[in-house]
Image (spheres, rainbow, N blue to C red):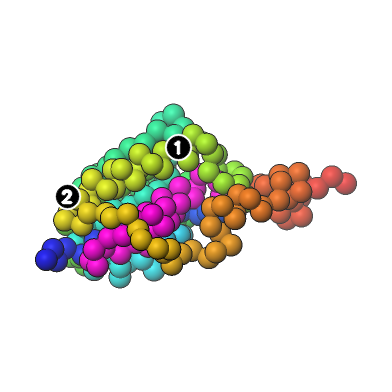
Amino acid sequence: MNSKRILVLGIGNLLWADEGFGVRCVEALNAGWEFPPQVELMDGGTQGLYLLPYVQEADCLLVFDAVDYGDAPGNLREVVGDQVPRFMGAKKMSLHQTGFQEVLMAAELTGKLPAELVLIGVQPEELEDYGGSLRDIVKAQMAPALDIAFAWLERWGAPARVRQGKAASLTDAALAIEVYEGERPSASQAYRLGDARFLNLEEA
């Protein structure tokens, strides 16, 4: 039996459009496939250093995220090994990336950095859309991103199997992508750049 402990982590913020790419990917993995018991799928959200104990326990870490590489929107990159921390800090888009860089640094300082690191990252198209969802060009990269993940999990001795039956959700049911996209108010009903009362953007 393969004893490698594998953590598959989706990080980002579902509420800010393409920032939710990582979480949506790990949700899709969990919904459609099953894995051997040494594999843990986790919605890391924006938890930052709270993720450190989970990272320290892993032998292999695979991260899905939206990362601003300066590429064309929707471009997918596979980053491996010691390049992962550098790419996580390529251009900070939000606090979660600063936090996750610190997680990797802290794991390394404690001698518990996973032996194998993989980042599957997409270049976002839109981030300034509070309550928005993935843009089509970014959503289209979910399937290719999962294919890359399947290949790594196979290499690590933890192949995917099509799920039989319904999985327990990794996130709150109200944030499931079908519900989130189907029931959210339109941009004309709900201001998408934050709260206009605090941003002082309301018309007099």
Q: Which residue lies furthest to the front in this view?
A: 164
In the rendered view of the protein, which quadrant contains the N terminus?
bottom left
Q: Give the range drawn in magenta.
A: 16-42
Snapshot quadrant of residue 56: bottom left
Pointers 1 and 2 in contact (C-beta within 8 Å): no
> Was residue 24 drawn as part of the magenta stretch in this picture?
yes
Q: Nearer the viewer, residue 142 or 201?
A: 142
Q: Which of 111 and 146 is in front in this view?
A: 146
Instruction: Give the crowd class for mark 1: few <14, some 14-19, many >=20 residues within 10 Å.
Output: few
| Residue position marked by numbered label 1 in the rendering | 140
Residue 14: % across, % down: 52, 54
The kind of residue on which mark 2 rests is Arg
Front-lying residue, 52 or 30? 30
Check if residue 161 falls in the magenta segment: no
In the picture of the structure, the residue carrying the numbered disc 2 is 155
Q: Where is residue 116 in the image (x, y as percent from the top left)?
A: 19, 53
Residue at (60, 49) in percent of width and height? 181
Secondary structure, mark 2, is: helix
Secondary structure of the residue carrying numbered label 1: loop
34 sits to left or right of 66: left
